[in-house]
Amino acid sequence: MKVLLVQPDYQRKGLSPEELSKRLLPSYPLILLSEILAKAGHPTRVLDAWSNWILSGKGVENDLLVGAQKLLEKESYDLVGISVYTPLRKEAVELARLVEKISPGAKIVFGGPHPSRLWHTLLESDQGNLDFIIKGGAEQSLPQLADNLEGRGVARFRVPGLAWKGEGVEVRSNSNPVINLDLAGQPVVNFNDYFADAGADRIDRAYLVTTRGCKRWCNYCSQLWKKALYHPPDRAVEEARRLIVDFHAGELVIYDDCLGMNPAHSSEIFQKISRFNNSARLIGISHFQFLQKDWLEHFKNAGGYGLMIGIESGSGKLRRKMNNYIEDQTICQGIELVRSLGIKIGIYVIVGFPTETAEDLGKTRELLEMIAPEQVIATVYDLKPGDMMVEFGIKSQMIRESDYLNLSRRLINYMTETELKQAAGAAEWLENKFTKELLLKDTDPAGWILGLDQATREQMTQKAARDIAP
């Protein structure tokens, strides 16, 4: 069975080829799935933002609908899997409709955090002409589904985490989302077929993960796991070696949910990477409560250049409401530790969390002034399917699951349109005010994500400057 796996992205226009080459990253999860499928006898191709840009001629625009259409018209695929994140659900649905139009015989399966929570609503709505949804990890379920569609392997009702529409309008599901994965049994990702399909032999930037999940219960996160799973260190190291040595990646982003959850695990990985890495800089993503000197020293010695850490808000009161309370003292100690090792600092903040006030935003500004980070990434608060605030909103009838079927609104939250624009303006003002160097380049301004025109974005950032600045 021939399979196409697609990771949607925003339609990017007006950027230079140099900007796009630095911004776009291969989709590590889909490349992993493609190699698992190939090993099970199902030839698989991955189309993500980076490979689409390469295939499209490395131009100034990048639209996956264009690349997907070329592939679908050139080759016939039996199964098309689309990974769905909530802000990109519109692009995912458009891709599914394109598949249905060009290859009406192909089966379509959605996976990822968004459909894992909203599987029933999506299947019932017929949005995107879906055949299947895989809830949670797909490493076991997707090959079994492909086997089943070929008439072999396990029966459909035994495929873990699978949901589909039965006869008539009945929506069926086999189990809860799959979260207990055997990471030790997964193959080392070699990336060979992915780069060969894209027609490239090197890459500027790439990413991998060394852990899955997080032990924390922050109520703004859609992370389904609420537990930590760890890739075998030797496997993570070999994947890093492949990207750095064989494909000449000059930068490697460790996109763990929280790097350093297991300090010994992180230390071992970075100790081994330091033995061969003398060219690529590493960017990590962690949490203040996971910062420890031992693993950070190994991270630095392995090429560690920058670390992204979330404070979310300068207001301790708001951090408590986020179920992510960090003492100001812990933040200060963490910053001192990271700085003492010569590692640059990026800070995540959230704007527009319920009950946030101008005073709270002022405290965020004050804390950022004290930290003096190299980069700030400010996002507008949104309700991601799977987080606790979604369940609260549905039970209190403040939102409905059907709200996520509205493809014209990128983010779902409790804000009015005016409040949403103001939050985007505050987020962009914080980023512009405090960013001196882009440690993490694959991010987008809040106003751009929401589709606001440039005049509105400028108007909102000017308002934010008046409201937040002293």
Image (cartoon, helix red, strand yellow):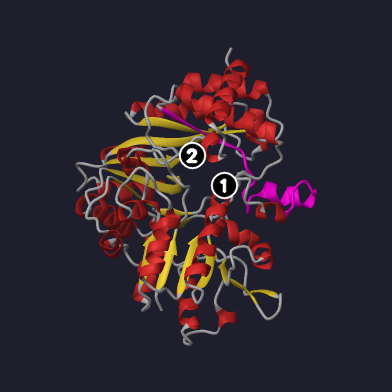
Image quadrant where residue 447 sits:
top right
Residue 4 covered by magenta stretch: no
Q: Measuring 29% from the left and 51% from the top, which residue is drawn there?
A: 57
**x then y, percent, for residue 309:** 47, 36
- Picture disc at residue 334: none
Residue shown at 48% from the left, 39% from the top? 287
Where disc 1 sits, the SS reads loop
Q: Label 1: which residue?
A: 216
Mark 2: secondary structure: loop
Q: Residues within 10 Å of mark 2 (few under 14, many from 20)?
A: many
Q: Is residue 186 visible?
A: no
Q: As drawn, is 370 to the left or to the right of 246?
A: right
Image height check: is 49 above or below 37?
A: above
Answer whether labels 1 and 2 touch (C-beta < 8 Å): yes
**Looking at the picture, which amino acid does disc 1 mark?**
Arg
Instruction: Judge whether residue 378 is colored magenta.
Output: yes
Q: Quadrant of residue 205?
A: top left
* Nearer-the-camera pick, 306 or 449: 449
Q: Between residues 217 and 65, which one lies in front from this camera angle?
A: 65
Query: Alpha-carbon distance for marks 1 and 2?
Result: 10 Å
Residue sitting nearer the eye, 28 or 213: 28
Q: Tell me the tag on residue 287.
A: 2
Please give left or right for residue 447 compared with residue 22 in the image: right
Q: Amino acid at mark 2?
A: His
Expressed as whole percent of the image width and height from the top left, the position of residue 24 reads 37, 46
User: x%, y% of residue 101?
Assistant: 52, 68
The quadrant of the image that shows the C terminus is: top right
Q: Which image quadrant: the N terminus?
A: bottom left
Residue 210, how many percent across, how many down? 39, 53
- First reached walking from the N terminus: tag 1 or tag 2: 1
Q: Which residues are magenta?
A: 375-401
